[in-house]
Amino acid sequence: MWLRLRYALLVAFAPPALWAQRNPSGDEEQIARLARQYLDARLANDTALMHRILAQEYASINSNGVLGDRAGALRLPTNVTPNGQQIAAFEVDSISTRLYGTTAVMIGVRRVRSTNGSLGRGLRFLFVFIRRDGRWQLVASQATDIQPRDGAPSGSVRSDRQPPAVRRGPTGSIPPEST
């Protein structure tokens, strides 16, 4: 009886932060929103927003295998590919997010739409976020070109091996930023 009473009191008076750790969907939504903000900031050359999103020790590997850091990511223009092609939009799908305490790993597929309207072949990407001082920050990113399947048209992508998602939104994509 006393054990049940103590448990009931513990549950009733547990700090809200404890409950937030047991319900990761709020964190997943924050991470999806932050990833969308990061991509939108790149398109808009909004280095002030990128400055807030990128952790001080941010590191990246682009699709050409080149290592990057925060200073390089904040240099203008931010809306071009490593090959110098201007980016008009990012199309993102096949999102999977996993939480590991104060670390989150997001993987997915990102296609670049250029200013001439053409859609790139696609990149598999990985974002690593950390929770620091009560907010999520992007600490690392990596992108890999998706190779076409053997015998497939050059615009098709290999997406036959998707990682299992912990939780997906209705369409499995990063929701657009609401205005």
Image (cartoon, rainbow, N blue to C red):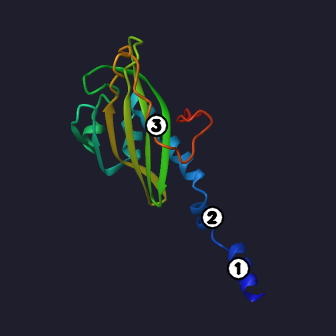
From the viewer's perspective, is residue 119 above or below residue 77?
above
Residue 144 position in % (x across, y down): 31, 33
- Image quadrant in which you'd find residue 121: top left
Q: Which mark is residue 64?
A: none
Q: Residue furthest right?
A: 1
Front position in the image: 176 or 7: 7
Residue 68 position in % (x across, y down): 24, 41
Q: Amino acid at mark 2?
A: Trp
Q: In the image, which is nearer the foreground, mark 3 or mark 1?
A: 3
Q: Secondary structure at mark 1?
A: helix
The Cα–Cα distance between marks 3 and 1, rounded to whole angstroms, is 41 Å
Q: Is residue 44 visible?
A: no
The answer to whether marks 1 and 2 mark residues whose Cβ atoms lie closer than 8 Å is no
- On the picture, is 163 further left or further right than 80? right
Residue 10 position in % (x across, y down): 68, 78
Q: Amino acid at mark 3?
A: Gln
- On the picture, is 21 further left or further right than 159? right
Q: Is residue 115 visible?
A: yes
Q: Secondary structure at mark 2?
A: helix
- Image quadrant in which you'd find residue 38: top left
Crowding at label 2, few (<14), some or many (≥20) Cα neighbours within 10 Å?
A: few
> What quarter of the picture does the N terminus occupy?
bottom right
Of the numbered discs 3 and 2, the one sitting upstream in the chain is: 2
> What quarter of the picture does the C terminus occupy?
top right
Residue at x 55%, y 32% (from the top left corner): 176
From the viewer's perspective, is residue 34 above or below residue 17?
above
Residue at x 22%, y 36% (from the top left corner): 65
Q: Which residue is mark 1?
A: 7
Residue at x 37%, y 20% (from the top left corner): 120
Q: Which mark is residue 19?
A: 2
- Image quadrant in which you'd find residue 61: top left
Of the numbered discs 1 and 2, the one sitting upstream in the chain is: 1
